[in-house]
Amino acid sequence: MRAVLEAQPDIEVVGEAADGAAVIPLVRQLRPDVVAMDVRMPLLDGIEATRAVLRTVPEPPRILVVTTFENDEYVYEALRAGADGFLLKRARPTEIVNAVRVVAEGESLLFPAAVRSLAAEYGTSRARALMERAALTEREEAVLRLMARGLSNAEIAGQLVVGTETVKSHVSAVLSKLGARDRTQAVIAAYESGFVAPA
């Protein structure tokens, strides 16, 4: 993965950690934009390392979860913990590079069908109550549904026939009303509450 990423002119690999416990001090020291976090690591797994980075690092990086199996419950837990995206270890080099770029931009969402199903399965009454309290407008609901399909702001704008800035405004409103840190958290809430059903 390092060789694939270093071959890109717009990506610089600034560090590597052999285990989850080493991730936190490295992130503090090197200040990366994106962390590719293996879900299963010695000493501290990727879920706890993700939580620790997001809890203790000011202006934390985007976190891309890397795993072997897409239906891994650890992946879902890492996304719930605040990871921004998801990548399979068997992904092709172009997919690895694209995933890092997408997560760095915070535009789109890597949310496979297996993880959507897990989110629906682990649905909670708390998530349903949160969605009800949010009182999203009709347009905000439409935007959230399209976010849940993994569409970027530009793609949502095309679907709704509005400007990208308008979409950004709606996305910000959705995140604010749901108290979500980012798009991933908003989409998890949408699936857990049953507002969006896994296709």
Image (cartoon, rainbow, N blue to C red):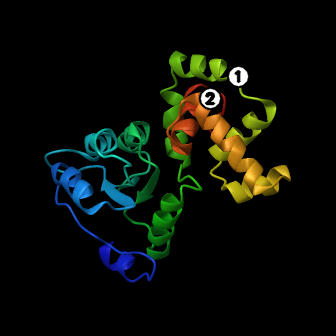
Residue 111, numbered label: none
**Dot placed on the residue nearer the N-terminal end, 1 or 2:** 1
**Residue 153 at what x, y percent from top left?**
69, 54
Q: Residue at 16% x, 49% y: name it.
A: 21
The answer to whether marks 1 and 2 mark residues whose Cβ atoms lie closer than 8 Å is: yes
Q: Residue at 67% x, 53% y: name it.
A: 151
Q: Is residue 46 left or right of residue 4?
A: left
Element under disc 2: helix
Dividing the image into 4 quarters, which one contains the N terminus? bottom left
Above-or-below relation of 22 to 180: below
For the residue carrying disc 1, how many other residues have a C-alpha within 10 Å: few (<14), some (14-19), or many (20+)? few
Residue toward you, 152 or 65? 152
Q: Residue at 57% x, 37% y: name it.
A: 186
Q: Is residue 133 visible?
A: yes
Farthest residue in the right direction? 161
Dividing the image into 4 quarters, which one contains the C terminus? top right
The alpha-carbon separation of the residues under discs 1 and 2 comes to 8 Å
Q: Amino acid at mark 1?
A: Ala
Q: Is residue 11 left or right of residue 191?
A: left
Q: Is residue 138 left or right of residue 176?
A: right
**Residue 167 at what x, y percent from top left?**
73, 49
Above-or-below relation of 127 to 94: above
The residue to which callout 1 is attached is 135
Residue toward you, 70 or 154? 154
Element under disc 1: loop
- Count of all numbered marks drawn on residues in the image: 2
Where on the picture, by quarter, is residue 128? top right
Q: Amino acid at mark 2?
A: Lys
Residue toward you, 164 or 129? 164
